[in-house]
Image: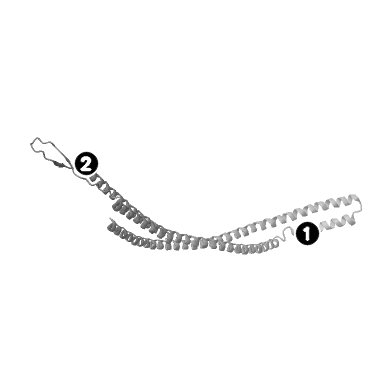
Amino acid sequence: MDKYDYHFISIKFLTSILLALIFAFLLIYVFTPQQRENYPVYRLQQKESIFSEEKPTFNFESLAVEKSLQQEKMAFEKTLRDRSFELMEQSKQRMLAVITAGYLEKLNGLREEKMQALEAKRRTLDQREEKLLQQKRQELEAELSRKLQQLRQEIRNKYSDFNQKEILDNYLRIINLQLQIEFTAHTESEKEKFRNMLKKVRSEQQALMAAKNSRLNEAISSKTSALIMEFNQQYAAYREKIRDKHQQILSELREKISAELAAAREEIKKDLALAKAEKDAELEDIIANSKKLYY
């Protein structure tokens, strides 16, 4: 609880008591109605007897007014006294409320501090996760690149003999036909014949090469997909492992914070009850002394 608030409420409480005492003093010693001096009024009454006799008569109306004023005074004093006691009680309750608010603020401050520590830990773990995942990705990508190079080489070796004889034969035929066109053919018709044959052989050669490349690409694509799937599975498994570990750390920290806050709540509750009891007894003693002294 703020010391300023505590002293401020104490001053208000004492001020209310002081004002009540001043009002009581003014009422009793300053504003007390003064009784007017009443003198008995005598009236002469004629008697039928020989001797006339004077009998004193009192003014009962004046006595009724005096009694009414006295009753009003007593009622006013009672109202003032009750109001003073009410103000004292209200001031006491306000001071106790300030004490309660101070302890609640202390508990809220402790909880806020723990939540900030938890959030800081979460950010630290997020940064650690990002760093570890980046390192793991680089390792897996390097491993994937090495496996892909090895895979291509293995597949090329495996399919190196695919259509190899036909391709080599066509290659030799192409060379032979080119030589015939350049050196053997004497007429244009012979050259045209060799050109058509060369065109046909080249077309066959392209078909053989396309078939071989298609077979290589299919094999590489199939194996590459398997390697990429393995890469993704390894990366996802590692990420899940890191996140599970971090979640466990945060869960344990939350449980620890909850236990600490529960213990602190009980301790603050006890301190609050003790502080309120002490302050209540102190204020009740002040109120009792004020009642005894001035009322």
Q: Residue at x 51, y 60 (%)?
A: 119
Q: Residue at x 23, y 45 (%)?
A: 66
Q: Against 26, is 59 above or below? A: above
Colour setup of the view: one colour
Amino acid type, residue under disc 2 in the picture: Glu
Q: Give me the C-alpha separation between circle 1 and circle 2.
A: 151 Å
Residue 82 is tagged as none
The reply, left or right, for residue 144 in relation to residue 207 is: left
Q: Where is residue 174 in the image (x, y as percent from the top left)?
A: 82, 56
The reply, left or right, for residue 221 in relation to residue 56 is: right
Give the quarter of the figure containing the N terminus. Answer: bottom left
Q: Mark 1 points at which residue?
A: 168
Give the farthest residue toward the left.
50
Numbered-mark total: 2
Give the farthest residue toward the top.
48
- Of helix, strand and loop, which one carries label 2? helix
Q: Where is residue 39 in the image (x, y as percent from the top left)?
A: 20, 45
Res. 68 image quadrant: top left
Give the farthest residue toward the right.
186
The reply, left or right, for residue 271 in relation to residue 155 is: left
Q: Are marks 1 and 2 in contact (CB under 8 Å)?
A: no
Q: Name the residue under label 2.
A: 61
